[in-house]
Image: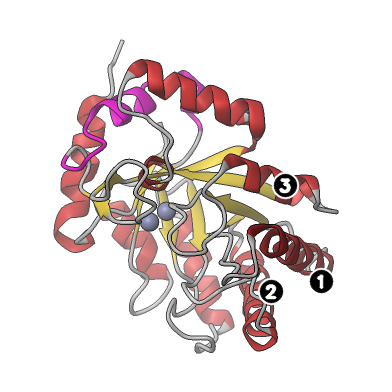
Amino acid sequence: MILGAHVSAAGGLHNAIGNGEELGCDVVQIFIKNPNRWISKGHTDDAIDGFKEAWKTSSIQTVVVHDIHLTNLASPKPDVLKKSRVQFREQIQLADRLGIPYIVTHLGAHLETGEAEGLEMLSHSFNQLFEDTNDTSVSVLLETTAGQGTNLGYRFEHLRQIIDTSKYPDRLGVCLDTCHVFAAGYELRSEEAYHQTFDQFDGIIGLDRLLTFHLNDAKSEYNSRIDRHEHIGEGNLGITPFQLLVNDSRFSHTPMIIETPKMEEMHAVNLAVLRELVETG
Ligand SMILES: [Zn+2]
Ligand SMILES: [Zn+2]
């Protein structure tokens, strides 16, 4: 199992590695830009080298970037779309310099223009971004969403469409968030339902595209289309889906990242709960 958490990179990117090691993470997820700003301070060559050095000498196997919160690559508003594309391109280039293979992103929101139009815009955005960053080896992981408001990505079919319409399908994978799919109406709470949902995923997207998990319990209700994370085993998902996931041999090499609340106090607790679930022997 490759287990880890979203960790803070406050005070310098290299700190994320230390924070992850303290928690015994095999994988960490980080922001490489201020998630709430369009423009953030760049990283010096020294900072980039410092991060790479810290990572190389650590027990962290994999690092994943999470996109900033403002991005809307499906936006019908020209200014937002432009800003989204510019900063996303910068994140791809920065991730490449850091040696990070993946950026996880949500699919954006159509803002009442309709899902078909939103998905088409999103597809154009990715085609342009991948063309502009053809000299990098960074892939984008499309995250399954809860489908709050006009957010896209709450049906597996949306992700399939983006892959199908991409000129660069090799640079697209998927990140499945347990809280989001549950809130979007995919059941996971029994062994039977778990297998049904993953069969559906396999049929529509293909398990070979599933390259990362976000393991979050849900404060939100089933099919509520609301995105609220809860501590592992404490929410509406309960412990069963997590027990099944950490013991599913199909996913033994797939990074599993928690994004549960109160990371400072609670990440260690949530990771311990997950490690306890692993059946040995
Ligand atoms: Zn997530
Ligand atoms: Zn979420």
Amino acid bearing label 3: Gln
Q: Label 2, on which residue?
A: 89
Q: Distance between the residues labelled 2 and 3?
A: 22 Å
Residue 281's place in the image compared with 229, above or below, is above
Residue 132 shows which numbered tag? 1
Looking at this view, is 109 or 215 the one in front?
109
Q: How far apart are marks 1 and 3 (CA)?
A: 21 Å
Residues under numbered marks 1 and 2 in contact, where contact means CB atoms less than 8 Å apart: yes
- The x and y percentages for residue 232 are 22, 41
The residue at the point 22 percent across, 40 percent down is 236
Amino acid bearing label 2: Arg
Q: How far apart are marks 1 and 2 (CA)?
A: 8 Å
Q: How crowded is mark 3: few (under 14 residues within 10 Å), some or many (20 or more)?
A: some
Which quadrant, please, contains the N terminus? top left
Verify whether residue 57 appears in magenta. Answer: no
First of labels 1, 3 by sequence position:
1
Looking at this view, is 51 or 211 the one in front?
211
SS of the residue under disc 1:
helix
Amino acid bearing label 1: Asp
SS of the residue under disc 3:
helix
Residue 47's place in the image compared with 79, above or below, is above
SS of the residue under disc 2:
helix
Task: Left or right? Give the position of 57 relative to 121.
Answer: left
Residues under numbered marks 1 and 3 in contact, where contact means CB atoms less than 8 Å apart: no
Q: Label 3, on which residue?
A: 161
> What are the residue bounds of the magenta stretch?
234-253
One can see residue 47 in this view: yes
Q: Residues within 10 Å of mark 1 (few under 14, many from 20)?
A: few
One can see residue 248 in this view: no
- The x and y percentages for residue 173 are 64, 45
